[in-house]
Amino acid sequence: MKAGDCNAMEKTFGIRIVILGSFITGISLFHYLTPLHVAYLHDIFQRLYYLPIILAALWFGLRGGLLCSVIVSLVYAPHILFQWGGHFGMEAEKYLEIILYNTVGGVTGLLSQRERERTVELQKSKGVLEASYEKLRAQSDRIIAIEEQLRNSERLSTMGEFAAVLAHEIRNPLGSIRGTAEILKDDYGPDDPKHEFIEIQIRETERLNRVVEDFLHMVRPQPSEMQPCAVQEELETIVTLLGGEAARRQVELVLQTQPNPVVISADGEKLRQAFLNIVLNALQATPPGGRVTISAVADVKGACKISFRDTGSGIKAEELGRIYEPFFTTKSDGTGLGLAISRKIIESHKGKLEVESTPGTGTTVIISLPKQESVNGEMA
Ligand SMILES: Nc1ncnc2c1ncn2[C@@H]1O[C@H](COP(=O)(O)OP(=O)(O)OP(=O)(O)O)[C@@H](O)[C@H]1O
Ligand SMILES: [Mg+2]
């Protein structure tokens, strides 16, 4: 219980005691000061004692009710004894009233105490029910998320059935188109106005070929070749590969150094593919003068955490939930497969890929890969 609640309770307790004390004192004064011949007033005052007794029983339970009725009895008894002594009938009636005070104090106190205990029990059950409800809700959220994943994989496996056929059907004519475009390119030199169209044709066939390849990769994942893989070295390769692209975009590409390089068991080629997609996205989203920072650390639990932070445009809240969907893209020349493939690769390594983004400030992609062995054989 908080100190504030304690103070408030003490204050209420004090006020109630003062109220009861005032009632008992007031009623007793009326008794002692009112002449005996106005008997009807004494009858009224006598009944007024029930007020503090019932209040005490309601506020403080059995003990409070009884204590109050005993105090009332003690205060009232001398009045009966010394002022009503000799009036036998009246005296007996008033002693009987004292018995009733104590009965009412006890019974009302007992009932109110039981009521209070039931309320406490109900409060407890309410707490337990609320906790179970929270647990159920969390479980149902998890079930919904798993169902969504299942639906996604079902969709992907159906797509996989068609992918091979489709890829075959597309790739062959694509090869012919590309071949004929190359022949035409020889006939139309750079000075010819048609040269540019042929360039476009070649570029677009290349893009189409890449889409088919990416799609195939995603729906027909090759079995992973798990081998010791130095994460820092893979990241260095990516930085070297994309250094030119970063310079062309005037974006600073920084790989933070790691004193204890982490080696994990992974398919290096696939990890590289995922890293490449993510860094490319970061470079594409970052305006000239911006920066893309990559760092890999082993976190407290020993998991390898790789973060890719950019100072780019960020992702709108309404788009953040869709970026992993195959073919979701906001780019005119994007295929929308980069992140879908990357996430699949990381999940096939039992890892997690998360994206945090603030529009206008930048995006951070965080990859967590489970605890693995470090270079010198210790647990990283
Ligand atoms: N670092 C980032 N900053 C801002 N937006 C991003 C970032 N990374 C991803 N996105 C958003 O997520 C979308 C999906 O990314 P994804 O890599 O899957 O496809 P893409 O880059 O559009 O196409 P591609 O298949 O050529 O990679 C992007 O179109 C972009 O809107
Ligand atoms: Mg991309």
Image: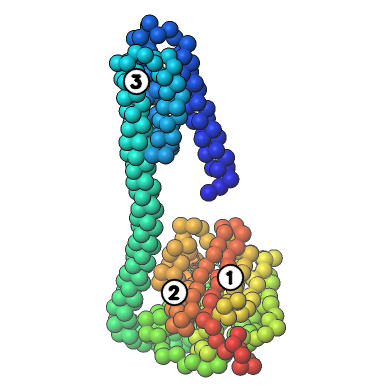
Q: Taking 121 as reference, is 281 left or right?
A: right
Q: Going 59% across and 87% down the picture, which residue do you hit?
A: 379
Where residue 317 appears, x then y in whole percent? 49, 57
Q: Which mark is residue 94?
A: 3
Q: Secondary structure at mark 2?
A: helix
Determine crowd level at label 2: few under 14, some 14-19, many 20+ residues with C-alpha closer than 10 A: some
Residue 374 sits in quarter: bottom right
Q: Which mark is residue 282?
A: 1
Type of amino acid under label 2: Ala
The mark closer to the camera, 3 or 1, is 3
The mark closer to the camera, 3 or 2, is 3
Q: Going 34% across and 23% down the picture, which residue do you hit?
A: 95
Q: Can residue 78 be seen here?
A: yes
Q: Is mark 2 within 8 Å of ligand 1?
A: yes
Type of amino acid under label 3: Lys
Type of amino acid under label 1: Ala
- Viewer-proximal residue, 98 or 368? 98
Q: In this rendering, is residue 20 above or below 335? A: above
Q: Which residue is mark 2?
A: 340
